[in-house]
Image (tube, rainbow, N blue to C red):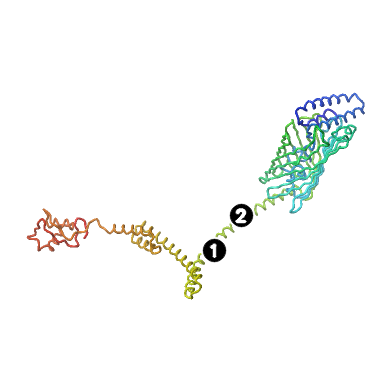
């Protein structure tokens, strides 16, 4: 193990207490010194020093939190080739690892195997690698089940194994949920130093097993856009080999991931954000398929805290039911002067090809849209038919009510004539009275409204008749009475001329003459002979005298007053 190997392990260490930082720096300095001395010592001594350094690093992990415990380094050449941005895409067997909710979208059985060599080219020959086996099986009306096995190891010194039991289901057309039950296992190689180290209970504890739970969700916002949220290691299993006074537990921290993916025919673009303890990482990736999903190119970029920077590229070749995937990952910070990491995967898919699935999905989508349109059309037609039936029903009920009212009236008469039960007679009478009352109310409203309309049109005689009829249906109604009084006043006003009635007698005033009196009374001086004819026995020589009382013809007018 050389300086670069140590640097790889060091980048996974996150101190819990700032007071321990100087211890780390001292150990790192000692490690660099010893690795330079190795060139001048015997191979046996070299091996002993390597073992000693690994023991020191493991002992240090009892004082600080090792992110190396089941760290999310990704799996599968296809997702890793997209920079690990796969949470919201999750459309193949690798959903077992990235987001179990994606299993709800898988419609055929898939099995995959993959292997990766990490940081190829470490000049001490250290072998860091990872492997993955996965299988998913859709079950009708149940969901999709999945199995997974994940391995990460530094050959001969340290290994981590994860066994996954997964389940995912679409609970609605655009919503899926899933979960993982995991068994986590880590193991270190035994040597003379683990036998004397309390971290490993003096050689008695070289492995640890724990159980964990993941949860995932996936939402298809549109046909092309999806959003995902997942949580890993929710219960934070304790993976310490043996508790010591310096460290009583070493829990795997829970992680949170959110992601967005855009899918359009042969193009997939995804962005993920991962949060774990104090670390934040952002992954971006894209892939493009060519030649009817035969060949694909992809790339991705990851950045985050602790100077995390990774670049990834990848490719796929699909033939028949097989997919061959490759990914190359190169660190842009941290470990340098290596050949990067390389991932290989082989996936076998039982069922239709991706092109056929896409076409089938497009046909199904079109069929769903047509079906939805037909349902909407049928619904509109049914609503129109329901409205027509409701109107017909209302009409029938009105006729039925009229008939029932008539029948009840007849029954009431029969019951009264036959002196049937007083209660039934009373009930029938009440129903009849209610019907009469409603009819009177209707008639009252009709004639009252008719009267108001006739007033508006100036037909006062008709208005008076209408209000009288309204009053006949609601005796003593103040509104109708007030309207009748008003109409009568208006009729009286119209009937009265602008003249006042003529009195029966007229007393002659100084200066009056018969023509002048005729003019005052009749408004016409030429009618003086009428006055003379009635009063000729009182008039001498056609002259009238002041104070003389004259009799006036009843058909005449005087000063605008009608007799």
**Label 1 packing within 10 angstroms: few (<14), some (14-19), many (20+):** some
Q: Is residue 462 above or below residue 204?
A: below
Along the viewing direction, whichever of 79 and 506 lies nearer the viewer = 506
Residue at point 59%, 56% (across, down): 380
- Locate the N terminus by quadrant: top right
Label at residue 140: none
Along the viewing direction, whichever of 146 and 504 lies nearer the viewer = 504
| Relative side of 223 to 319, left or right | left
Residue 436 location in percent, x, y? 45, 66
- Locate the C terminus by quadrant: bottom left
Residue 376 location in percent, x, y? 61, 54
On the image, which quarter does residue 299 sit in?
A: top right
Residue 288 location in percent, x, y? 73, 41
Along the viewing direction, whichever of 293 and 324 lies nearer the viewer = 324
According to the picture, the residue beneath numbered tag 2 turns out to be 376
Secondary structure of residue under mark 2: helix
On the image, which quarter does residue 291 sit in?
A: top right
Residue 488 location in percent, x, y? 32, 59
Secondary structure of residue under mark 1: helix
Q: Is residue 60 above or below residue 478?
A: above
| Relative side of 490 to 190, left or right | left
On the image, which quarter does residue 181 sit in?
A: top right
**Label 2 packing within 10 angstroms: few (<14), some (14-19), many (20+):** few
According to the picture, the residue beneath numbered tag 1 turns out to be 393
Q: Is residue 347 visible?
A: no
| Relative side of 330 to 543, left or right | right
Distance (Cα) linking label 1 and label 2: 25 Å
Q: Is residue 561 visible?
A: yes
Q: Residue farthest to the left?
A: 541
Observer-side mark, 1 or 2, equals: 1
């Amino acid at each position: 193990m050389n300086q670069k190997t140590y640097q790889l392990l060091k980048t996974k260490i996150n101190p819990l207490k700032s007071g321990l930082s100087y211890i780390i720096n001292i150990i790192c300095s000692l490690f660099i010194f010893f690795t330079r001395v190795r060139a001048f010592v015997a191979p046996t001594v070299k091996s002993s020093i390597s073992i000693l350094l690994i023991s020191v690093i493991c002992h240090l992990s009892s004082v600080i939190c090792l992110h190396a415990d089941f760290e999310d380094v990704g799996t599968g050449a296809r997702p890793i080739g997209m920079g690990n941005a796969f949470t919201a895409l999750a459309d193949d067997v690798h959903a077992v690892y990235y987001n179990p909710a994606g299993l709800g979208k898988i419609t055929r059985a898939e099995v995959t195997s993959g292997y990766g060599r990490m940081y190829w080219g470490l000049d001490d020959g250290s072998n860091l690698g990872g492997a993955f086996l996965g299988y998913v099986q859709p079950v009708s009306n149940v969901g999709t089940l999945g199995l997974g096995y994940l391995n990460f190891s530094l050959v001969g010194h340290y290994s981590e194994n994860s066994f996954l039991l997964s389940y995912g289901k679409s609970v609605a057309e655009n919503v899926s949920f899933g979960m993982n039950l995991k068994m986590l296992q880590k193991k270190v190689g035994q040597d003379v130093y683990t036998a004397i180290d309390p971290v490993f209970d003096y050689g008695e504890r070289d492995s640890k097993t724990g159980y964990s739970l993941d949860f995932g969700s996936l939402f298809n916002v549109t046909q092309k856009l999806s959003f995902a949220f997942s949580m890993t290691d929710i219960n934070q299993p304790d993976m310490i080999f043996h508790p010591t006074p310096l460290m009583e537990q070493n829990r795997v921290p829970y992680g949170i991931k959110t992601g967005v993916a855009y899918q359009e025919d042969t193009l997939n673009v995804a962005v993920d954000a991962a949060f774990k303890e104090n670390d934040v990482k952002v992954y971006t990736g894209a892939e493009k398929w060519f030649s009817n999903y035969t060949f694909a190119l992809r790339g991705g970029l990851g950045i985050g805290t602790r100077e995390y920077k990774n670049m990834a590229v990848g490719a796929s070749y699909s033939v028949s039911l097989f997919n061959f995937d490759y990914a190359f990952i190169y660190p842009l910070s941290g470990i340098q002067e290596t050949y990067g990491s390389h991932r290989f995967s082989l996936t076998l898919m039982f069922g239709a090809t991706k092109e056929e699935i896409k076409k089938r999905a497009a046909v199904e989508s079109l069929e769903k849209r047509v079906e939805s349109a037909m349902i909407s059309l049928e619904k509109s037609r049914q609503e129109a038919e329901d409205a027509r039936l409701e109107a017909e029903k209302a009409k029938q009920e009105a006729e039925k009510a009229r008939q029932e009212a008539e029948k009840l009236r007849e029954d009431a008469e029969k019951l009264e004539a036959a002196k049937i039960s007083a209660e039934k007679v009373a009930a029938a009478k009440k129903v009849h009275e209610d019907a009469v009352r409603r009819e009177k109310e209707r008639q009252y409203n009709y004639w009252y409204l008719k009267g108001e309309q006739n007033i508006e049109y100036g037909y006062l005689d008709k208005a008076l008749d209408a209000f009288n009829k309204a009053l006949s249906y609601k005796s003593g109604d103040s509104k109708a009475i007030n309207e009748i009084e008003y109409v009568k006043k208006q009729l009286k006003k119209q009937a009265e001329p602008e003249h006042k009635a003529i009195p029966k007698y007229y007393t002659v005033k100084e200066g009056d003459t018969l023509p002048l009196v005729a003019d005052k009374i009749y408004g016409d001086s030429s009618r003086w002979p009428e006055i003379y004819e009635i009063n000729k026995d009182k008039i001498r020589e056609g002259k009238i005298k002041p104070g003389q009382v004259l009799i006036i013809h009843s058909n005449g007018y005087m000063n605008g007053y009608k007799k």
